[in-house]
Amino acid sequence: MNDSKIPPQIHDLLQEIGKEVHQPIYVVGGFVRDLLLRRENLDLDIVIEGDAIAFAQYLTDKWDGRLQSHRKFGTATVTRPDGFKIDFVSARSETYEHPAALPLVRWGTIEDDLYRRDFSMNALAMDLNPDSFGALVDCTDGLKDLRAGNIRVLHNQSFIHDPTRIFRAIRYEQRYGFQIVENDQTLIREAICQGVLEFVSGQRIRNEIDCILAEETVPRTVQRLREFDLFRAIQPKWSVPVDFTTRWNAARKAIDWASKYLSEDKINIDAMLWMTLLGCLHATEAVSNRLGLENQLRSKLIAKGRLCKTLDKLNPDSKPSEVYMLLKPYPLEALVFTLMQVDWQTENIKNYLIKLRRVQPLISGDDLIQLGLKPGRCFTDLLWKAFSAQLDGKVFTKQEIYQLLRIKDEI
Ligand code: CTP
């Protein structure tokens, strides 16, 4: 294959790796696929017909890098001193005992290793051994499929053995403008009907959805997931809002807006992207449970679900203190996302985000103590009365607050 398209530094690195070993060694998967498609991909997955961990250890010592290895899986990642990472794996064949189970692994040849993979276009390898450097290994007609834009599994049980491949097929289809071949669309529908997704952990599904949200074709991909009724298969209450594309555009705008106007705040972008996929509160809770979302993300999504009801309590004449009190419990992500999504209450939300939430109270409990008041429950009421008057522009100094609270009279 034409290795002149490989960036020079990577080319040198691959040649160096090939020279250091006496067993057959290959770069495989996404790197080869994208090289043939002339797309940049710097993820190096190296397969060696031999002990990958021992070889990775040797390169780590040579480069003075760092090694992370998983003996159980025969995999290792070498991080070079400049931070560049390379994955190594021993060539293996895999068999599955039941749907979505972890595979039983045996060492094997490069052909075994390619046959265990998801799609023919990902089952391509490029030889790194000096005598045959750059030769393509294609035992599944991957190149033909790549040229035709076909996404094709290598055997009929593929989606049943590893149901995450359903998400991967759809993600690639939209990323490259390819098509899942007819037979495989049927296999996907059959696998979903058989309930294979029930066997997949929430974490694995969540990872797949995170990968989808990181693509540039999200609205089309989500539409396709809906065509296969995948969301409902993950959790029966999950129906992605019909106005997904509008929500997605709102989220993108919200992220831009936040980076401009709330640059000092830490905004969780993933949370805003996830908000596009979840509508009503009820479903949000069910999906969060199914996917095992971490508490921080879950609470932001649930808050977003609640916010609409809160906004109903506000109107254009609401006082700043009312706006403050109602919006204060909500995370910034929920507020910014909603700001871009609704065309009502925008002034109230903006005023809160940009101005009100940054106002510092003129007086604190210490001031009240210094004035001789005894700390107690009344402090909360007094301090809120003072702060709300301040927010509403009725008082501007401590003295005005004391007058308002009639504290001076009481002492
Ligand atoms: N793979 C697989 N089945 C999976 C996941 C991965 O067979 N469920 C194989 C594929 O051969 C894939 C390789 O492992 O090419 C590496 O996986 P990954 O890094 O997830 O994919 P890439 O091909 O690098 O694609 P992407 O550009 O999406 O990262």
Image: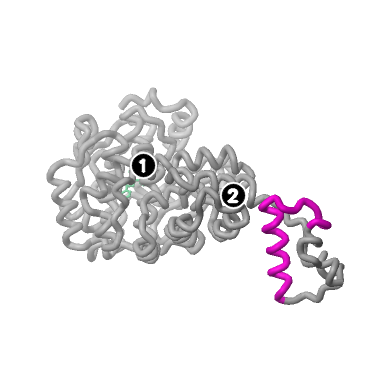
Amino acid at pointer 2:
Tyr
- Residue ID for mark 1: 246
Give the quarter of the figure containing the N terminus. Answer: top left
* Res 94 visible: no
The relative height of residue 228 versus residue 386 in the rendered view (above or below) is: above
Q: Which residues are magenta?
A: 377-400
- Residue ID for mark 2: 352
Q: Residue furthest top?
A: 4
Q: Where's residue 142, x and y in %?
A: 23, 37
The relative height of residue 218 versus residue 403 in the rendered view (above or below) is: above
* Res 43 visible: yes
Mark 2 or 1, which is nearer the eye? Answer: 2
Amino acid at pointer 1:
Thr
Q: Which of the 4 image quarters holds residue 73?
A: bottom left
> Residue sitting at 61 percent across and 45 percent down?
354
Report the magenta stretch's main SS. helix
**In the foreground, 101 or 261:** 261
**In the foreground, 116 or 302:** 302
> Residue sitting at 85 percent across and 68 percent down?
409
Q: Where's residue 101, x and y in %?
A: 28, 63
Q: Residues within 10 Å of mark 1 (few under 14, many from 20)?
A: some
Q: Where's residue 72, x and y in %?
A: 40, 61
> Residue sitting at 44 percent across and 34 percent down?
14
Q: Check disc 1 and report its element: helix, strand or loop.
A: helix
Is 42 part of what is drawn in magenta? no
Is 384 part of what is drawn in magenta? yes
* Mark 2 sits near ligand 1, with its Cβ under 8 Å away: no
- Residue 97 falls left or right of residue 20: left
The relative height of residue 37 versus residue 395 in the rendered view (above or below) is: above
